[in-house]
Image (cartoon, rainbow, N blue to C red):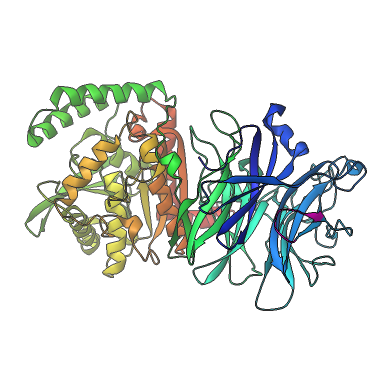
Amino acid sequence: MGLRLDDKWVWDFWFARAGEEHHVFYLQAPRALGDPDLRHRHATVGHAVSTDLTHWRVLPDALHPGEPGAWDDVAIWTGSVLAHEGRWYMLYTGTGNADEGLVQRIGLAVSDDLVSWSKHPANPVIEADARWYETLDRSRWRDQSWRDPWLFTTAQDDYVHVYITARTPAGEPDGAGVVAHARSRDLVSWEVGPPVTDGGEFAQVEVPQLVALNGGYSLLISCLEEDHSRRRRARPEVIPRSGTYIFSGPSEFGPFSAGPGPLVLDDHGTQTLYAGKLVEVAPGELRFMAFRGDGAEGFAGELTDPLPVSLLPEHGLAVQDAQRSRAPVKVEIAPEIRDLIEWGTQVSERYGELPLERLRVELAREHDQEMRRLGMRLEAGVSFADHTLAVPGGEIRVRLFVPDSQGPHPLFLHLHGGGFVFGSIDSVVNDAKCSRIARRARCAVATVDYRLAPEARFPTAAEDCYAALEFLASEAPRLGLDVARMAVGGESAGGNLAAVVAMMARDRRGPKLVAQLLEVPVTDISSSGADYPSVAQFAAGYGLDATDMDTYSEQYLGAGGDGGDPYASPLLAQDLSGLPAAHVLTAEFDVLRDSGELYARRLLAAGVSVSATRMLGHTHGSAVLWPVWEPAERWMRTVEGALRTVLHPHERTRREHGIA
């Protein structure tokens, strides 16, 4: 449960380490206020101690607002603690009635034992410097942001340094949030300097923490969803959510640049995890803690237990919230999706006892019939032909859809889904989707009848798909294809195979791909593939059950199969650099959502150009409803637009230069 007080909300916090004890200082306010928004003007600093970051002993409060008329007589806000020359020093944020609580300043408190604190008579010791930072200007922002000091020292000099969240007076107000820097030799007299982050990303940022990670430095920053700037939201790889973000930089003093998405997202049925901090529990062993904020049951106002942290190869972090992983959720889904899921359940129950070979036939027949009933059909203006390709141990078919226009055509290699066990290029939905993309994205579309598990185990399907790519590239002149404009993609298991084909092409110096389009991709079928929060949250009733995914993985890998092989689980690859630009679409209510989004972030961290979109309201497989449900039609238009952009770059260039 973490640190929870029955009578008080707990939120922003900071640590100090004394021997084996972790001291945590935190903002608190009475739950009796009723409205959590009132807590900010009633905040005091609480104090607790623990040896394991899980079981806490509450100590006397550390700080309270000043007496009436004092500079900090409204509230005390976030700070940090530093041991310096035999004493403990705390910088903290204060607001006063003289400024109607609208101007934030930094004060200093001193302690000999971390329990009894005395405010320094020189307070406030740091104020915003108008040369670099916005002072109170109600036309630009609701208050003067100058808060959340983070103290640190460095081997480079003998100063004590502090980072403070602030706003710059330059640029658009919705992107003015920056991190300020100041330094001092005595913690009383401070020299304020320019910011260590650029503006433009956030309206405001909060609660920074500087940490050394993977040979570089990272600045943890928190931001609310509504405080992402318009410029930031326009970047396709950004996930604009409330949470803790990681900024990376080459040294303690930056410059720091923002990452695309938070370490922990706010998810349906759970509280937002905010104001996150990393804490070292043993040499080199980190844990992540945050406070639980707004959620389905209101403001939780409690600290999490320490959460495991994984260091990613590209100077990144992945944080797992164990409590959320165990929390199934119930959400309302569109009636069109509900009807599709109920139909699928009935069909599965009707034929579930059949042998696999017969089951494939019956399910395919039922699925084709239902898709025709929904109005799915081949797109006009497109022709197709099958090609047979010999592969080790057999042969496969490659179906090529070509638009009725002059070639050579760019190529999109589309790989169907079905859990590696089901699916065919002969299905109604595969024909309809490929022909639609061919016409509307103005490209040839090839689709591969790769061999299925369990008859053909890993890596047969991936090798079949790569063989098809090589065949299409080698036969491009005869088939009317442009090898300079080739992309690969697929949905679900097909998204896995598409990601793997892109890796194979890189590793084997094969055909050059300009993009990979991954729809609800399977990216981790290892033993840890069930550990992502979305697996438990949407484990049953959302189109792809977690138990079905387990079965598909077992069928594909076989006994003793290595799910950690990057050609089986691309998310686990150590090196993702040098891969083609990626467009990743995940569904909001899908067991595969979190692993797919993590793959997108890992690609981005590896230097790959990434567009990542969470398709709201969707479940796994709901995109097939495009004839009858507008959000599914938007999904298809997103796919087609992404392909037009990467396969017809000359048209984008002409538009950018105003050429019709």
Along the line of sight, which residue is nearer the eye, 350 or 326?
326
Q: Is residue 179 above or below residue 173?
A: below
| Highlighted range, magenta | 112-118
Residue 368: horizontal and vertical position, in percent?
21, 29
Q: Residue at x 13, y 25 (%)?
A: 351
Residue 117 within the magenta-colored segment of the rendering: yes
State which quadrant residue 221 falls in.
bottom right
Q: Residue at x 46, y 48 (%)?
A: 612
Residue 482: horizontal and vertical position, in percent?
32, 60
State which quadrant residue 500 falls in.
bottom left
**What secondary structure prevails in the magenta region?**
loop
Q: Is residue 26 left or right of residue 408?
A: right
Along the line of sight, which residue is nearer the eye, 652 or 173?
173
Residue 75 within the magenta-colored segment of the rendering: no
Residue 624: horizontal and vertical position, in percent?
33, 33
Q: Is residue 389 left or right of residue 649?
A: left
Q: Residue at x 21, y 55 (%)?
A: 462
Q: Is residue 307 above or below residue 343?
A: below
Q: Residue at x 76, y 37 (%)?
A: 42
Count of numbered circles on the image: 0
Q: Is residue 235 above or below residue 367?
A: below
Q: Is residue 393 above or below residue 536?
A: below
Along the line of sight, which residue is nearer the eye, 410 or 43?
43
Along the line of sight, which residue is nearer the eye, 271 or 77?
77
Residue 44 in view of the camera? yes
Residue 184: horizontal and vertical position, in percent?
79, 70
Residue 234 in view of the camera? no
